[in-house]
């Protein structure tokens, strides 16, 4: 492989540090970036030291409603025009001048927009699926048809067996799909011996429907009523942040719950090191069908020897072993989640043992070295 291009809808989103990892560490010094935008306030929170081509307008790679209607008509006629990127000479020149011979597209829907260009330039293309692009978009007739075009690429990457089955059912060839779980950069084992009388819970994630912040707060409220020593640090921002903040006020949880909003990743990691239990109540969004892939925050928590309380949702059970490295409950069952929190809060030995079990799982299956080696082996085919 001469050079790898990471093709991303944007650059610098707080919730997409996994893309930063891909750019910096898959092929250091031999990676370039093509992205739709890096403009604040939504993007630009981090940058990378790599040749970068910014399309400046995400519409360059996104599809407008009008264009989707037109493409739908053409689909029915068995036709499809070349994507706009096919005619972007400066982009073609950028890829040629940097000797790019492999492109990895972040998100399946955006990967479809570079198929024609990759074929024209004789560049191998691998599409990397993540969360909403696999769970939500794939249910829409337009995107289901567009995803059929991914059978023309060199490979499709997803992070869980759960997502692989979704893609196969959508008509993607089984032999094209490669399950490569996200990997965590391991630091030395952190001893989880409690230094205070309080039991510190931590939750990290965007305040969106599929992460169900209100259900998490409800679960914590039920548990905290029975254990005064419970505390919760809730990190994340998003559409439901104000509602979550109001929930804390309405149920008078201000002395137990601290809402932090968005924090840089290093601050989140430092708080994980001080925590005792990690919480996440993931659900399938009832309105859109959006689901998680395999939340990186859960893997990070396990890497720091935190027992996890979460849900039987998407790829989560492939990482969190119920009754071994944490507890999993049915989506929406706040009372069962409260019981799981209380079980861990009352037994320090249980927390430590489950935390160690989670760390062992990460070391065997979910390290960055494992992910990187698997990606390099695939991309070099």
Image: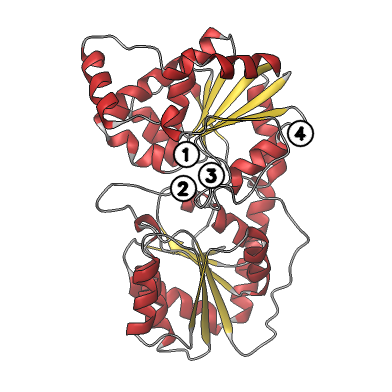
Mark drawn on residue 39: 3
> Would you name the residue on which mark 1 appears?
161
Q: CA distance from mark 3 to mark 1?
A: 34 Å
Spot occupied by residue 177 in the image (x, y as percentages of width and height):
49, 27
* Dot 4 and dot 3 residues touching (CB under 8 Å): no
> Would you name the residue on which mark 4 appears?
28
> Dot 3: few (<14), some (14–19), or many (≥20) neighbours within 10 Å?
some
Mark 3 or mark 2: name the one nearer the start of the chain.
Answer: 3
Secondary structure, mark 3, is: loop
Taking the spot 64% from the left edge, 23% from the top edge, the residue there is: 379
* Dot 1 and dot 2 residues touching (CB under 8 Å): yes
Spot occupied by residue 82 in the image (x, y as percentages of width and height):
40, 12
Mark 4 or mark 1: name the one nearer the start of the chain.
Answer: 4
Mark drawn on residue 315: 2
Mark 4 or mark 3: name the one nearer the start of the chain.
Answer: 4
Q: CA distance from mark 4 to mark 1?
A: 28 Å
Taking the spot 64% from the left edge, 43% from the top edge, the residue there is: 20
Q: Is residue 113 left or right of residue 20?
A: left
In the image shown, does 354 or 226 lie closer to the viewer?
226
> Dot 1: few (<14), some (14–19), or many (≥20) neighbours within 10 Å?
some
Q: Quadrant of the N terminus?
A: top right
Secondary structure, mark 2, is: loop
Q: CA distance from mark 3 to mark 2?
A: 32 Å
Q: Quadrant of the C terminus?
A: top right
Spot occupied by residue 313 in the image (x, y as percentages of width and height):
40, 53
């Amino acid at each position: 492989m001469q050079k790898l291009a990471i093709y991303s809808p944007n650059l610098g989103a707080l919730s997409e540090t996994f893309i930063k990892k891909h750019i910096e560490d898959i092929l250091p010094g031999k990676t370039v970036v093509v992205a739709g935008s890096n403009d604040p306030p939504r993007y630009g929170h981090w940058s990378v030291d790599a040749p970068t081509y910014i399309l400046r307008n995400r519409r360059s790679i996104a599809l407008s409603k009008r264009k989707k209607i037109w493409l739908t008509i053409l689909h029915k006629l068995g036709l499809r025009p070349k994507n706009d990127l096919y005619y972007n000479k400066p982009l073609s020149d950028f890829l040629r001048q940097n000797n790019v011979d492999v492109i990895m597209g972040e998100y399946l829907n955006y990967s479809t927009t570079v198929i024609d260009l990759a074929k024209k330039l004789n560049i191998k293309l691998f599409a990397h699926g993540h969360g909403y692009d696999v769970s939500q978009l794939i249910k829409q007739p337009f995107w289901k048809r567009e995803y059929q075009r991914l059978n023309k690429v060199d490979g499709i990457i997803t992070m869980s067996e759960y997502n692989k089955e979704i893609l196969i059912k959508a008509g993607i060839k089984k032999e094209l799909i490669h399950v490569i779980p996200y990997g965590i950069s391991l630091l030395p084992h952190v001893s989880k011996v409690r230094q205070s009388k309080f039991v510190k819970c931590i939750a990290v994630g965007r305040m969106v429907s599929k992460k169900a912040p209100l259900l998490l707060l409800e679960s914590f409220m039920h548990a905290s009523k029975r254990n005064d020593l419970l505390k919760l640090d809730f990190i994340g921002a998003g559409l439901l942040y104000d509602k979550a903040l109001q929930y804390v006020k309405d149920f008078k949880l201000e002395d137990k719950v601290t809402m932090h909003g968005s924090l840089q990743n290093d601050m989140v990691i430092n708080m994980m090191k001080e925590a005792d239990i990690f919480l996440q109540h993931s659900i399938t969004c009832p309105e859109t069908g959006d689901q998680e892939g395999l939340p990186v925050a859960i893997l990070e928590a396990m890497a720091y020897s935190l027992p996890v309380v979460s849900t039987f949702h998407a790829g989560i059970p492939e990482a969190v072993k119920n009754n071994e490295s944490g507890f999993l409950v049915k989506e929406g069952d706040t009372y069962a989640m409260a019981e799981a929190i209380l079980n861990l809060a009352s037994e320090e030995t249980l927390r430590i043992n489950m935390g160690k079990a989670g760390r062992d799982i990460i070391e065997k299956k979910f390290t960055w070295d494992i992910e990187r080696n698997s990606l390099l082996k695939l991309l070099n085919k």
